[in-house]
Image (tube, helix red, strand yellow):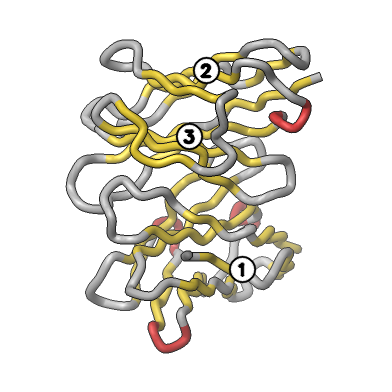
Amino acid sequence: AQSVTQPDIHITVSEGASLELRCNYSYGATPYLFWYVQSPGQGLQLLLKYFSGDTLVQGIKGFEAEFKRSQSSFNLRKPSVHWSDAAEYFCAVATNQAGTALIFGKGTTLSVSS
Amino acid sequence: EPEVTQTPSHQVTQMGQEVILRCVPISNHLYFYWYRQILGQKVEFLVSFYNNEISEKSEIFDDQFSVERPDGSNFTLKIRSTKLEDSAMYFCASRGLAGVETQYFGPGTRLLVL
């Protein structure tokens, strides 16, 4: 069965510093990969997704993620973090079957210090 | 931009009571989902719905749960006899027909069972 691991429960980054949030997945074939962000009291907003093609994908709010098949990873990056980026970040995976559910990681809480 | 809406935003109920959570998916979407997130835990899949029937469900989705699309716009989740452990944020999501497209999430309903 597929699974998602986000090894970091909580990360604190200084405003203006770079960010990398880790995500590893377990799935036999190439999965469809997503990063969602959840601000306090809000729903889940899609940051970016990877289905196929270029392994470096760009998302909203200046985020990008790189799919590395050899490492079964899909890490999220941002070159310069803003205070408004403080939120919880979820990595999710889906198989290529129509209608399939998303499997989420446990999430990483990002705090931004000034 | 079209979005998924959910009502109510918050609901408090007594243990043993029935609750109905409502969702209005994006209008041209055909796959519908319910997920839940217990406080401090990851988002978990409950059920997916397509062509007026359940296409997939998780172990969480037992006989106490049911889903319905009563008309052309609403998608509901009913919990027949709520338990304390049903307290969670419930998210509705929808997606289009072609391939494995992105699931768009609503803002959630915070359910508190006392």
Q: Which mark is residue B96?
A: none
Looking at the rendered structure, the secondary structure element under dot 3 is strand
Residue that label 1 marks:
A6
Q: Position of residue A104 (x, y in %)?
A: 53, 56
Q: Residue at x 63, y 74 (%)?
A: A17
Residue A12 pos. (x, y %): 74, 67
Badge 2: residue crowd in 10 Å (few <14, some 14–19, many ≥20)? some
Amino acid residing under circle 2: Thr
User: In percent of the image, x 74 and y 47: which residue is there?
Assistant: B40
Indicate the quadrant containing the N terminus of chain B: top left, top right, bottom left or bottom right.
Answer: top left
What amino acid type is highlighted by mark number 3?
Answer: Trp
Estimate the spatial distance between the alpha carbons at disc 1 and disc 2, rounded to whole Å: 31 Å
Mark in front: 1 vs 3: 3
Mark 3 on the same chain as mark 2: yes
Q: Which residue is mark 3?
A: B34
Residue that carries the numbered disc 2 in the rendered image:
B7
| Subunit under mark 2 | B
Residue at 59%, 20% (x, y): give it: B79
Vertically, is B21 above or below A42?
A: above
